[in-house]
Image: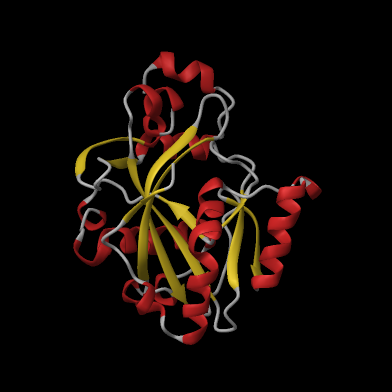
């Protein structure tokens, strides 16, 4: 870590700082071909996103219980990007390591999802077997968080239906809740109206607006495989 990069981020939470500099994200082009790797820190600086067009691979997990309620999390106050916003179950990045670079059947993203569900939500690996995740699609989006930080991700959307034990990590997660469709629609209404200071993450909102409710139908009907489209990269810019 360079001393010069250190000073402007003196207020950064120690845990988040460590992750920002130790985690190496997978850089890809807009066709999801690996072109390199860089730190989580560099990948989330808006100046790099805008000037270098840095794009990294990500995943978003949508975990439903067997009552078909979706588990949401509120990101912790110490998160560097989008603190205290409500979002889907778990959102993070495959890292530049062998097990998370495997592209066949999106295995790298699924391995990363299992790792982060434990890290963020304390969900044991045996509760979320890698082969139980269904990769449904990929989307490319860009979203500024504040003046300095933002996201530019090629995001793998992973669905799973499991009853799990949840023990959230307070460094990552401020709160959790299961919601049915109507409860989610009410959350969206409140966010749109600016009620209760409630905010939704931009990637979650893109999935809600473009895919979620029709995919939720497939979850309930047991026909989720009919919705899979991993060939298309939906560019939601």
Q: For this rendering, which residue is in front, 126 or 230? A: 230
Q: For this rendering, which residue is in front, 223 or 121? A: 223
Location of residue 38 with respect to 173 vertically, above or below: above
Locate residue 181: give its quadrant.
Answer: bottom right
Which quadrant of the rendered structure holds the C terminus?
top left
Residue 61 falls left or right of residue 82: left
Residue at x-position 40% and y-position 61%: 157
Name of the residue lying farthest toward the top: 4
Q: For this rendering, which residue is in front, 104 or 221? A: 221
Residue at x-position 45% and y-position 27%: 46
Location of residue 201 with respect to 210 vertically, above or below: above
Q: How is the image coloured?
A: secondary structure
Residue 191 in sight here: yes
Name of the residue lying farthest toward the bottom: 221
Location of residue 18 with respect to 138 vertically, above or below: above
Find residue 147 and report its horizontal and vertical position in percent. Answer: 56, 24
Residue at x-position 55% and y-position 49%: 172
Find residue 177 and report its horizontal and vertical position in percent. Answer: 66, 65
Find residue 38 and report its horizontal and vertical position in percent. Answer: 29, 34
Locate residue 112: give its quadrant.
Answer: bottom left
Which quadrant of the rendered structure holds the N terminus?
top left
Location of residue 175 with respect to 83 vertically, above or below: below
Residue 162 in sight here: no
In this figure, what is the number of numbered marks? Answer: 0
Q: For this rendering, which residue is in front, 186 or 70? A: 186
Residue at x-position 32% and y-position 58%: 109
Residue 197 falls left or right of residue 90: right
Locate residue 124: give its quadrant.
Answer: bottom left
Find residue 144 and report its horizontal and vertical position in percent. Answer: 52, 33
């Amino acid at each position: 870590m360079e001393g010069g990069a250190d000073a402007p981020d003196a207020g950064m939470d120690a845990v988040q700082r460590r992750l920002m500099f130790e985690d190496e994200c997978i850089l890809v082009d807009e066709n999801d071909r690996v072109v390199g790797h860089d730190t989580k820190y560099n990948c989330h600086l808006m100046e790099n996103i805008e000037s270098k067009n840095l794009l990294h691979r990500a995943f978003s997990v949508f975990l439903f219980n067997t009552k078909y309620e979706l588990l949401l999390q509120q990101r912790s106050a110490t998160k560097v990007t989008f603190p205290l916003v409500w979002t889907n179950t778990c959102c993070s990045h495959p890292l530049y390591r062998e097990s998370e670079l495997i592209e066949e059947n999106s295995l790298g993203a699924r391995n990363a999802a299992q790792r982060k569900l434990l890290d963020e939500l304390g969900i044991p690996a045996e509760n979320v077997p890698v082969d139980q995740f269904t990769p449904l699609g990929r989307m490319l989006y860009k979203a500024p968080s504040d003046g300095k930080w933002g996201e530019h991700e090629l995001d793998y959307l992973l669905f799973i239906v499991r009853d799990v034990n949840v023990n959230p990590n307070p460094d990552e997660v401020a709160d959790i809740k299961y919601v049915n469709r109507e409860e989610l629609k009410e959350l969206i209404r409140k966010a749109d109206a600016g009620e209760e200071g409630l905010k939704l993450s931009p990637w979650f909102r893109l999935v809600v607006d473009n895919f979620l409710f029709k995919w939720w139908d497939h979850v309930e009907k047991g026909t989720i495989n009919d919705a899979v489209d991993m060939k298309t990269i939906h560019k939601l810019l």
